[in-house]
Amino acid sequence: MSLVVSASRECTRDASGRFPPVLGSPAVEAFEIYDVLRELTVSGRLYHEFLRTHDLSVGLYRLPAGATDPQSPHTEDEIYHVVRGRATISVGDEERPVTAGSIVFVGADVPHRFHDIEDELVVLVIFGPAEYTHRAEHQKGTPHGVAPA
């Protein structure tokens, strides 16, 4: 066995040289985007989370052409990967066009939204840590990353 030390934790490799799953996370999960899109359609919602572990969550977000994006700032960092569509994203004071293949990082608590949606927008959304992990801290008035007074 070899020991790997990082700033956050110690992990011990198993006999095969692999690290064990963290907090019961499965070793692997695989998804097909069209299956997830079908689940999103059946749900009738704009967003469908399809993977959640302690350290991240992943979902698919869909907005029709001409729609208004109803989201508000999230309490976790997030990454948007545009699967298809065309729109503009506002993040803080910055605006930029997005199309299939665009990847945008949005920091926790930063106001953001998609607008000027020209073609149906389908976006893979990755939260780190998992979405709403820090909600309780925010409700107590101590947003994640803010040093205690």
Image (cartoon, rainbow, N blue to C red):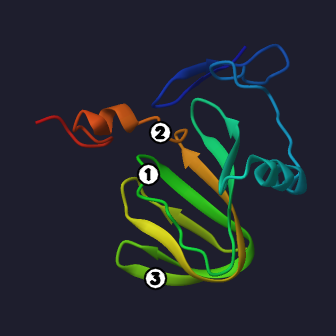
Q: Residue at x 39, y 37 (%)?
A: 135
Look at mark 2 in the image and give the residue it sits on: 132
Give the answer, above or below, for where 47 lies relative to 7: below
Mark 2 / mark 3, whichever is N-terminal: 3
Badge 3: residue crowd in 10 Å (few <14, some 14–19, many ≥20):
some
Residue highlighted by disc 3: 95
Q: Secondary structure at mark 2?
A: loop
Amino acid marked by disc 2:
Tyr
Tell me what residue is drawn at x 56 percent, y 68 percent.
Answer: 104
Q: Could you tell me which residue is drawn at 36 percent across and 55 percent down?
A: 109
Residue 100 visible in the displayed image = no
Q: CA distance from mark 1 to mark 2?
A: 7 Å
Amino acid type indicated by mark 3: Glu
Outermost left residue? 149
Say which of 21 and 47 sits in front: 47
Name above or below for residue 41 compared with residue 54: below
Residue 67 picture quarter: bottom right
Q: Give residue 21's position: percent from left, percent from top.
A: 71, 22
Q: Write the residue at 29% across / 36% down.
A: 139
Q: Which element carries disc 1, helix, strand or loop?
A: loop
Determine the secondary structure under disc 3: strand
